Image (tube, rainbow, N blue to C red):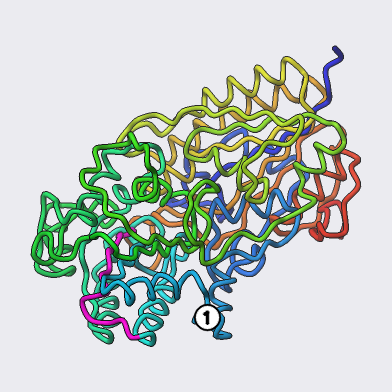
Amino acid sequence: MERKNPTLLLVLDGWGHAAAGETNAITQAPAHHFLEWWETCPKALLSASGREVGLPLGLMGNSEVGHTNLGAGRVVYQTITRIDQAIEDGAFERNPALRGAIQHALDHGSRLHLFGLLGDGGVHASSKHYQSLLGLAASMGLSGERIVFHALLDGRDTPPTSAEGYLAELDGMLSQVGAVVGSVCGRYFGMDRDTNWERTAQFWHAMVHGKAEFEAPDARAAYQLARERGETDEFVQATVVGRPGERCVRNDDAVLSFNFRADRVRQITEAFLARDFSGFERGAQPQVHYVTMTQYRKDFACPIAYPPEELRSLFGELVAARGMRQFRCAETEKYAHVTFFFNGGREEVYEGEERLLIPSPKVATYDLQPEMSANLVTDAVVDRLQKGEDDLYVVNFANADMVGHTGIQSAAEGAVRAVDGCLARIVQQALAQGGTVAITADHGNSEMMIDPVTGQPHTAHTLNPVPFVLIGERFQGAQLRKMGTLADVAPTLMEAMNLEQPSVMDGRSLFHA
């Protein structure tokens, strides 16, 4: 078989563009190969946050949003934007799934449990959404201790020790309707997505059985005790608030998960819904009315407040329609992004699409192994290139994001160096086969390791643009538009692959002004 001239899209998660400086892990590492390509190859900067990716103005981008826009070739209005609009125009109060959860508690004389990520990070949940849920419950006649809030603390998409302010804000919201907090837990435990079930179990037993190693009279006291133990927000161990067993989930209660992003609430949702469950010993499983804000997984049988909107004529779909082959590869932490999200929320593979999941290392935090599984991802991609069977490669390197989230700059620099070396291997092999390599990112992170305002470690994503660089003999000397958005990547690569861009894909190729 004649080897193909492949096109590669390498997505460097959390690799934003910013001026060189002491707190920029990318330039401090430094990323020698990448920086050389940036100076010598066709390049552009891409907006990866706010309205340019379908988010509210000024909201930082994230991996889900970034990959959805990259794969769609158009601005995809995100669920947070849809929900915000529904709150503004009154449709939120008429939502049948949300009203159904509250009505269930009213009809059964039971409780409504609300759980999700606290704060204004805007990546997984929104304070505007849970405030509106509290207001809706009160307007329907449910209030007092029949509303129980289970707070997951952030510290990744917000500063590492910012939960005190968010808990104070929550106190104000809850006091207006007389609601109470039932448990507090860091997202490291309650929002694990890598089948570390022992972490999920901590949150489950605190919320469902009112059992945890730690107890506190109120949420702010729970947080203060955690800080005294040396725990930052993300790593706060599950703590039962109030008398143990008093505010836990019981039969006939309604449980509503208000996170709008799916990936980090799938495990806790599976624990609630699955009949055959082997993740951990659940103990007594209460029969509840369970509702999710968005679709977390297609096989979860529960009401969904905001089901997905179907996207058509996506990059991967169009490649498949031409009878071309494509290869998707990432390690566990970002596998869903180059598959499910890149395909617009589609679980099924396209004809000619092959996927490879490389397991992420089992370490407590990724600063302990900043190279993660990048070398294994690279081995797999180089091996596929040598076989010469694929037309399109979509590959994610998780390091700059996952290690950037730790806030430890030395580790982030190590992550950048690891990825940079991997890029060199892939580019060398691709060019040897007459291929074209596009390197970009989904959002920023590691280019800002210290918050310039607070001086604290910066663990969240950024509002910075991301780089786009095009490497290949065919495009030496090509001029790209200086600024674009993530939606422009698919049209650019389709033009490079001589594929016709459909009208619904309204991103603009970077080859055109």
Question: Which part of the image, by quadrant, shows the N terminus?
Answer: top right
Residue drawn at (51%, 44%) of the image: 26
Q: Of residues 122 and 37, which is closer to you in this image?
A: 122
- Image side of residue 101 versus residue 350, left or right: left
**Helix, strand or loop at mark 1:** helix
* In this rendering, position of residue 218 left or right of residue 16: left
Q: Determine crowd level at label 1: few under 14, some 14-19, many 20+ residues with C-alpha closer than 10 A.
A: few
Amino acid, disc 1:
Arg
The answer to whether residue 420 shows anywhere in this view is yes
Outermost residue toward the front in this view:
107
Instruction: Locate residue 492, reporting x and y percent.
Output: 81, 48
Q: Give me the residue at 32% from left, 53% from top.
A: 187
Q: Position of residue 225 (x, y in %)?
A: 11, 60
Residue lying at the far top of the rendered structure:
1
Circle 1 is placed at which residue position? Answer: 94
Q: Is residue 392 magenta?
A: no
Q: Quadrant of residue 330?
A: top right
The answer to which of 22 and 501 lies nearer the viewer is 501
* Residue 143 inside the magenta-drawn segment: yes
Of residues 180 and 389, the one drawn nearer to the viewer in this rendering: 180
Q: Is residue 33 left or right of residue 385?
A: left
Q: Which residues are magenta?
A: 141-154
